[in-house]
Amino acid sequence: MWLNCDLGESYGAWKMPVDSAIMPLIDQANIACGFHAGDPVTLQQSLAEAIKNKLSLGAHPSYPDREGFGRRSMAMSNPEIIAALQYQISALSGMATVQGGQITYVKPHGALYNDMMQQRHLREAVFEAVGSFGHHQLSLMVQAHPDYEQLQQEARQYNVDLMFEAFADRRYTDEGYLVSRNCADAVLSYDDAIAQTQRLINEGIIVTQNHRKLKLKVDTLCVHGDTAGAVAMAKTIRQQIITNAEG
Protein backbone atom coordinates (compact mmCIF):
# COMPACT_ATOMS: atom_id res chain seq x y z
CA MET A 1 0.00 0.00 0.00
CA TRP A 2 1.26 3.48 -0.91
CA LEU A 3 1.05 6.80 0.93
CA ASN A 4 0.26 10.05 -0.88
CA CYS A 5 -0.16 13.74 -0.08
CA ASP A 6 -1.54 16.81 -1.88
CA LEU A 7 1.37 19.22 -2.37
CA GLY A 8 2.46 22.37 -4.19
CA GLU A 9 -0.48 24.28 -2.74
CA SER A 10 1.34 27.44 -1.63
CA TYR A 11 0.51 30.59 -3.54
CA GLY A 12 2.44 33.85 -3.32
CA ALA A 13 2.70 34.93 0.32
CA TRP A 14 0.43 32.08 1.46
CA LYS A 15 2.64 29.11 2.32
CA MET A 16 1.90 25.47 3.06
CA PRO A 17 4.62 24.52 5.54
CA VAL A 18 4.78 20.73 5.27
CA ASP A 19 5.87 19.93 1.70
CA SER A 20 9.61 19.39 2.29
CA ALA A 21 9.07 17.67 5.65
CA ILE A 22 6.48 15.19 4.40
CA MET A 23 8.00 14.18 1.06
CA PRO A 24 10.56 11.72 2.52
CA LEU A 25 7.66 9.87 4.18
CA ILE A 26 5.39 9.33 1.16
CA ASP A 27 5.39 7.51 -2.17
CA GLN A 28 3.21 9.75 -4.34
CA ALA A 29 3.12 13.55 -4.69
CA ASN A 30 -0.18 15.00 -5.93
CA ILE A 31 0.97 18.42 -7.14
CA ALA A 32 -1.43 21.32 -7.64
CA CYS A 33 -1.75 22.73 -11.15
CA GLY A 34 -2.49 26.41 -10.47
CA PHE A 35 -6.29 26.51 -10.62
CA HIS A 36 -6.93 26.11 -6.88
CA ALA A 37 -3.41 26.79 -5.61
CA GLY A 38 0.21 26.76 -6.67
CA ASP A 39 2.06 29.54 -8.50
CA PRO A 40 4.73 28.71 -11.13
CA VAL A 41 7.66 28.98 -8.70
CA THR A 42 5.89 26.81 -6.13
CA LEU A 43 5.12 24.13 -8.72
CA GLN A 44 8.68 24.19 -10.00
CA GLN A 45 10.06 23.79 -6.48
CA SER A 46 7.56 21.08 -5.53
CA LEU A 47 8.38 19.06 -8.61
CA ALA A 48 12.11 19.39 -7.94
CA GLU A 49 11.67 18.23 -4.33
CA ALA A 50 9.45 15.31 -5.37
CA ILE A 51 11.90 14.21 -8.05
CA LYS A 52 14.78 14.42 -5.53
CA ASN A 53 12.80 12.13 -3.21
CA LYS A 54 12.06 9.73 -6.10
CA LEU A 55 8.29 10.05 -5.69
CA SER A 56 5.65 9.18 -8.27
CA LEU A 57 4.42 12.46 -9.71
CA GLY A 58 0.70 13.15 -10.02
CA ALA A 59 -1.22 16.13 -11.39
CA HIS A 60 -3.77 17.51 -8.91
CA PRO A 61 -6.19 19.59 -11.05
CA SER A 62 -9.35 21.31 -9.85
CA TYR A 63 -12.22 23.56 -10.73
CA PRO A 64 -11.01 27.12 -11.54
CA ASP A 65 -11.65 28.24 -7.95
CA ARG A 66 -8.54 29.78 -6.42
CA GLU A 67 -10.58 31.96 -4.06
CA GLY A 68 -12.32 28.92 -2.60
CA PHE A 69 -9.25 26.64 -2.72
CA GLY A 70 -11.13 24.41 -5.16
CA ARG A 71 -13.57 23.32 -2.48
CA ARG A 72 -16.68 24.84 -4.06
CA SER A 73 -18.72 23.02 -6.70
CA MET A 74 -18.99 24.85 -10.02
CA ALA A 75 -21.47 24.49 -12.87
CA MET A 76 -19.32 23.53 -15.87
CA SER A 77 -20.19 21.61 -19.01
CA ASN A 78 -18.32 18.45 -19.88
CA PRO A 79 -16.34 20.17 -22.67
CA GLU A 80 -15.32 22.87 -20.18
CA ILE A 81 -14.23 20.27 -17.62
CA ILE A 82 -12.24 18.34 -20.24
CA ALA A 83 -10.47 21.50 -21.48
CA ALA A 84 -9.71 22.67 -17.93
CA LEU A 85 -8.17 19.32 -17.02
CA GLN A 86 -6.18 19.03 -20.23
CA TYR A 87 -4.83 22.55 -19.64
CA GLN A 88 -3.74 21.86 -16.06
CA ILE A 89 -2.29 18.40 -16.68
CA SER A 90 -0.38 19.63 -19.73
CA ALA A 91 1.12 22.54 -17.79
CA LEU A 92 2.36 20.40 -14.92
CA SER A 93 3.55 17.66 -17.28
CA GLY A 94 5.61 20.19 -19.23
CA MET A 95 7.17 21.58 -16.07
CA ALA A 96 8.01 18.06 -14.89
CA THR A 97 9.62 17.19 -18.24
CA VAL A 98 11.91 20.23 -18.04
CA GLN A 99 13.26 18.86 -14.74
CA GLY A 100 13.64 15.31 -15.97
CA GLY A 101 10.46 14.00 -14.35
CA GLN A 102 7.23 12.51 -15.69
CA ILE A 103 3.63 12.78 -14.56
CA THR A 104 2.24 9.25 -14.23
CA TYR A 105 -1.23 9.80 -12.77
CA VAL A 106 -3.96 12.34 -12.07
CA LYS A 107 -5.88 12.97 -8.86
CA PRO A 108 -8.67 15.59 -9.07
CA HIS A 109 -8.84 18.03 -6.17
CA GLY A 110 -11.51 19.07 -3.71
CA ALA A 111 -15.04 19.64 -4.96
CA LEU A 112 -14.27 18.23 -8.41
CA TYR A 113 -13.06 15.00 -6.81
CA ASN A 114 -16.16 14.72 -4.61
CA ASP A 115 -18.57 15.73 -7.39
CA MET A 116 -17.19 13.24 -9.91
CA MET A 117 -17.59 10.41 -7.42
CA GLN A 118 -21.33 11.06 -7.18
CA GLN A 119 -22.15 12.33 -10.69
CA ARG A 120 -21.50 9.97 -13.58
CA HIS A 121 -21.48 12.67 -16.27
CA LEU A 122 -18.62 14.41 -14.46
CA ARG A 123 -16.73 11.13 -14.09
CA GLU A 124 -17.06 10.59 -17.81
CA ALA A 125 -15.61 14.03 -18.48
CA VAL A 126 -12.67 13.29 -16.18
CA PHE A 127 -12.15 9.85 -17.72
CA GLU A 128 -12.18 11.39 -21.20
CA ALA A 129 -9.69 14.10 -20.22
CA VAL A 130 -7.26 11.65 -18.61
CA GLY A 131 -7.69 9.13 -21.42
CA SER A 132 -6.85 11.79 -24.00
CA PHE A 133 -3.21 11.58 -22.79
CA GLY A 134 -3.12 8.02 -24.08
CA HIS A 135 0.53 8.07 -25.16
CA HIS A 136 1.49 8.96 -21.57
CA GLN A 137 -0.69 6.17 -20.08
CA LEU A 138 -1.83 8.25 -17.13
CA SER A 139 -3.67 6.49 -14.31
CA LEU A 140 -6.50 8.15 -12.40
CA MET A 141 -6.64 8.19 -8.61
CA VAL A 142 -10.22 8.05 -7.32
CA GLN A 143 -11.85 7.47 -3.98
CA ALA A 144 -12.00 3.87 -2.81
CA HIS A 145 -15.68 2.94 -2.72
CA PRO A 146 -17.76 -0.23 -2.32
CA ASP A 147 -18.87 0.17 -5.97
CA TYR A 148 -15.28 0.02 -7.25
CA GLU A 149 -16.07 -2.63 -9.88
CA GLN A 150 -18.62 -0.31 -11.51
CA LEU A 151 -16.08 2.51 -11.50
CA GLN A 152 -13.49 0.25 -13.13
CA GLN A 153 -15.95 -0.77 -15.81
CA GLU A 154 -16.75 2.87 -16.61
CA ALA A 155 -13.07 3.83 -16.77
CA ARG A 156 -12.18 0.97 -19.11
CA GLN A 157 -14.37 2.53 -21.80
CA TYR A 158 -11.83 5.39 -21.88
CA ASN A 159 -8.75 3.14 -21.53
CA VAL A 160 -8.05 4.58 -18.08
CA ASP A 161 -6.61 2.54 -15.21
CA LEU A 162 -7.80 3.44 -11.71
CA MET A 163 -5.97 3.64 -8.40
CA PHE A 164 -8.22 3.57 -5.36
CA GLU A 165 -7.50 5.97 -2.53
CA ALA A 166 -8.69 6.03 1.06
CA PHE A 167 -8.27 8.97 3.43
CA ALA A 168 -6.47 8.69 6.71
CA ASP A 169 -7.89 11.90 8.12
CA ARG A 170 -11.43 12.15 6.78
CA ARG A 171 -14.74 10.78 8.07
CA TYR A 172 -16.99 8.75 5.76
CA THR A 173 -20.74 8.69 5.20
CA ASP A 174 -22.69 5.43 5.34
CA GLU A 175 -22.77 5.51 1.52
CA GLY A 176 -18.97 5.44 1.32
CA TYR A 177 -18.37 9.08 0.40
CA LEU A 178 -16.55 11.77 2.38
CA VAL A 179 -18.43 13.77 5.00
CA SER A 180 -18.61 17.38 3.82
CA ARG A 181 -15.99 19.71 5.25
CA ASN A 182 -18.90 21.96 6.23
CA CYS A 183 -19.64 19.44 9.01
CA ALA A 184 -17.75 19.83 12.28
CA ASP A 185 -16.57 16.21 12.42
CA ALA A 186 -15.45 15.88 8.78
CA VAL A 187 -11.72 15.90 9.63
CA LEU A 188 -10.54 13.26 12.09
CA SER A 189 -8.36 13.89 15.11
CA TYR A 190 -4.84 12.47 15.08
CA ASP A 191 -5.82 9.46 17.22
CA ASP A 192 -8.94 8.71 15.16
CA ALA A 193 -6.97 9.00 11.92
CA ILE A 194 -4.33 6.55 13.14
CA ALA A 195 -7.06 4.11 14.22
CA GLN A 196 -8.75 4.45 10.82
CA THR A 197 -5.54 3.75 8.91
CA GLN A 198 -4.80 0.74 11.10
CA ARG A 199 -8.19 -0.76 10.14
CA LEU A 200 -7.62 0.05 6.47
CA ILE A 201 -4.15 -1.47 6.38
CA ASN A 202 -4.99 -4.60 8.39
CA GLU A 203 -8.60 -5.27 7.40
CA GLY A 204 -9.46 -3.07 4.41
CA ILE A 205 -12.44 -1.49 6.20
CA ILE A 206 -13.57 1.93 7.37
CA VAL A 207 -16.13 2.74 10.05
CA THR A 208 -18.61 5.39 8.92
CA GLN A 209 -20.06 8.32 10.86
CA ASN A 210 -22.94 6.07 11.97
CA HIS A 211 -20.64 3.16 12.87
CA ARG A 212 -21.31 1.12 9.76
CA LYS A 213 -18.38 -0.98 8.48
CA LEU A 214 -17.57 -0.75 4.77
CA LYS A 215 -15.11 -2.99 2.92
CA LEU A 216 -12.90 -1.09 0.50
CA LYS A 217 -10.31 -1.94 -2.16
CA VAL A 218 -7.44 0.43 -1.33
CA ASP A 219 -4.20 0.99 -3.25
CA THR A 220 -3.04 4.21 -1.58
CA LEU A 221 -3.69 6.25 1.56
CA CYS A 222 -3.86 10.05 1.64
CA VAL A 223 -2.73 12.43 4.37
CA HIS A 224 -3.76 16.03 3.73
CA GLY A 225 -0.93 18.50 4.14
CA ASP A 226 -3.22 21.06 5.75
CA THR A 227 -4.42 18.66 8.46
CA ALA A 228 -3.08 19.47 11.92
CA GLY A 229 -0.12 17.21 12.72
CA ALA A 230 0.19 16.00 9.13
CA VAL A 231 3.91 15.18 9.31
CA ALA A 232 3.60 13.23 12.58
CA MET A 233 0.59 11.42 11.14
CA ALA A 234 2.52 10.50 7.98
CA LYS A 235 5.42 9.14 10.07
CA THR A 236 3.10 6.89 12.05
CA ILE A 237 1.22 5.68 8.97
CA ARG A 238 4.50 4.93 7.17
CA GLN A 239 5.52 2.74 10.10
CA GLN A 240 2.11 1.03 10.05
CA ILE A 241 2.56 0.21 6.36
CA ILE A 242 6.09 -1.11 6.94
CA THR A 243 5.00 -3.24 9.90
CA ASN A 244 2.11 -4.71 7.93
CA ALA A 245 4.37 -5.54 4.98
CA GLU A 246 6.90 -7.24 7.26
CA GLY A 247 4.20 -9.17 9.12
Image (spheres, rainbow, N blue to C red):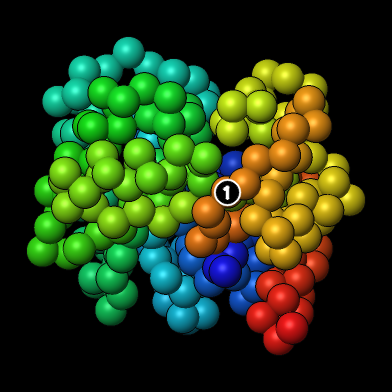
Please give the name of the residue rendered at 32% of the width and 47% of the height, measured from the top-left corner.
152
Residue 222, horizontal then vertical, whole percent: 60, 54
Please give the name of the residue rendered at 41% of the width and 56% of the height, measured from the top-left corner.
163
In terms of image quadrants, where is residue 2? Answer: bottom right
Question: Can see residue 33?
Answer: no
Is 19 rendered above or below residue 91? below
> Dot 1, how many residues are within 10 Å of its Cα: few (below 14), some (14-19), or many (20+)?
many
137 vs 67, left or right, is: left
Question: Can see residue 168?
Answer: yes
Please give the name of the residue rendered at 19% of the width and 24% of the height, measured from the top-left corner.
78
In terms of image quadrants, where is residue 84? Answer: top left
Callout 1: helix, strand or loop? Answer: loop
As drawn, which residue projects farthest toward the top? 75
Residue 191, horizontal then vertical, whole percent: 89, 51
Between residue 6 and residue 47, name the one nearer to us: 6
As drawn, which residue projects farthest toward the bottom? 246
219 vs 174, left or right, is: left
Is 196 rendered above or below residue 2? above
Residue 241, horizontal then vertical, whole percent: 69, 73
Image quarter where the C terminus lies is bottom right
Residue 13, horizontal then vertical, whole percent: 58, 43
Q: Which residue is mark 1?
A: 216
